[in-house]
Amino acid sequence: MERSLTGSFAERAEVAKSRCGPLVFGIDPSGGVLERWGLGDTSVGLGRFVDKVVETASGQVAFVKPQVAFFERHGWQGFRELQRFVSEARSAGLLVILDAKRGDIGTTNDAYADAYLRQGSPLSADAVTVHPYLGLEALSSLIEAAWINGACVFVVTRSSNPEGRPLQTARLATGMTVEAELLAEIGRVNAEYAPSGIGPVGSVVGISATVEPLDVERARAMLLAPGLGAQGGTPADLARAFGGCRERVLPSASRAVLERGPDVSALRAALQELSDALAAALDEKG
Amino acid sequence: MERSLTGSFAERAEVAKSRCGPLVFGIDPSGGVLERWGLGDTSVGLGRFVDKVVETASGQVAFVKPQVAFFERHGWQGFRELQRFVSEARSAGLLVILDAKRGDIGTTNDAYADAYLRQGSPLSADAVTVHPYLGLEALSSLIEAAWINGACVFVVTRSSNPEGRPLQTARLATGMTVEAELLAEIGRVNAEYAPSGIGPVGSVVGISATVEPLDVERARAMLLAPGLGAQGGTPADLARAFGGCRERVLPSASRAVLERGPDVSALRAALQELSDALAAALDEKG
């Protein structure tokens, strides 16, 4: 498989982290946020929100994670603002992780690759999140497109909500749980693409203080960890959950930051505080 | 929970089926289809495709199922064509099942409900497909919005592709498989909403000649069955798989029909042939 000339997602993420740290700024423009910021819950208000978050994020964080649902609720005009956001954020040097949670069978995944992971894709992103319910193998066209384009496919493995636990801990014929087997499978796919490095398949592993840590090391993957802040996860939980792979973790916070808006300097201060807390927790020897 | 004044999805589907039968026309405008139809693989070509399929479907079938990925690959202009398709198809009396395979945690699902399942939603549809990986309970805001709006949330339960089998047959702590437990859970939720009828949570169950049939009856649900035609499922497989609930099954075919285009009368003939074969297979006593 031809490697991208621009470097893999893992390599690009490493460079970006060395500048601004691993914090991912989650972009969740709910109707409530748009109203509280005085922008109005319309696609025009969403457009003003986009301007503000691009300004906030530039130079302050390395990663942004727009939650696509909050753009889709404004129909095609919302999708147009998402497209503008992706383009402007990338132009500002940010890595964009589209939290789209897509995923289907083969031919349809090829269409999603066209949408999000190819050169010239209308919403060409640095990474996209996907569901694994139809099987990791069914995602191969997305994974291949990601590799060629220096991007990443983050597979939801362990979610940050409690309702997902029964399914995610069901046992396969191998005796492994669904989430553990997924990490192993991701590891096998990544080893084929990048025998000595980190491959194009990432894993989404929610932060929780109460659930037993997973063996994330075997995934040879970048790890996206939602649930920091509003969902109850702390930087200390994060350090505990990711043991020996702390350097591959991208922790994400959204509501805990957005509630400090709409003032750009207040938003930047919230991001800085979280970044400082993360650095302190992740730098401690585990 | 306040019931919609327009009737539940199951009731509306029953009326629609009595007119045109249960066949669902799957709308998969891949780049290949747009090129073969001489429309061009652009959002303008996609717009012409939309015009043709609305004309084809009107009066010929009761249900259309646009696969959202094939619209997303054209960015916001593609999303605008999807929005126009949904609006024009519903104006023509078709029931629109959006094959979007969305699904997230609670607050994000509320945003998806805003997008697809509420009065005044920009893409207000009759049904939407979702992933269950984050747990059925996490989908409650979508389900409630569907019920109020006379719509349906189709939960992917058994997919039509082989790669999904290991996860879908993993065993929960209860000893049941993921797919069987999902059907039971769907049945419990539906019983709360519609104690004596069919509830707002549907189930997607792929057609396969080789896999053991599921106990779909317990879901008290409308059943969406993709995989007719190009993916290898036959009307006879369908009749076998859905035993005693044949009257709740909506079988879907896409490629097998679209390959007969772009001539509208040829497309209508393909739909009619499939409908006739379905009627013959489903009318036989099981």
Image: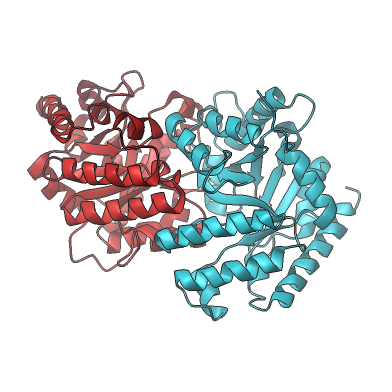
Chain colours: A cyan, B red
Image quarter of residue B148? bottom left
Image quarter (top left, top right, bottom left or bottom right) of the C terminus of chain B: top left
> Is residue A170 visible in this depiction of the protein?
yes
Residue A66: x and y in percent read 59, 57
Given residues A62 and B249, the one toward you in this image is A62
Residue B171: x and y in percent read 50, 32
Single out the residue that lies furthest toward the right: A285
Given residues A257 and A8, the one toward you in this image is A8
Vertical order, B62 against A109 (above or below): below
> Is residue A215 visible in this depiction of the protein?
no
Query: Is B23 on the left-hand or right-hand side of B37?
Result: left
Vertical order, B141 against B278 (above or below): below
- Residue plotted at (31% across, 21% down): B232
Given residues B259 and A101, the one toward you in this image is B259
How many discs mark residues in the rendered view?
0
Residue B88: x and y in percent read 23, 54
Image quarter (top left, top right, bottom left or bottom right) of the N terminus of chain B: bottom left
- Residue plotted at (70% across, 55% down): A94
- Residue plotted at (55% across, 79% down): A36
Image quarter of residue B277? top left
Single out the residue that lies furthest toward the top: B210
Image quarter of residue B46? top left
Query: Is A98 on the left-hand or right-hand side of A248?
Result: left
Residue A50: x and y in percent read 58, 66
Single out the residue that lies furthest toward the left: B19
Query: Is A90 on the left-hand or right-hand side of A17?
Result: left
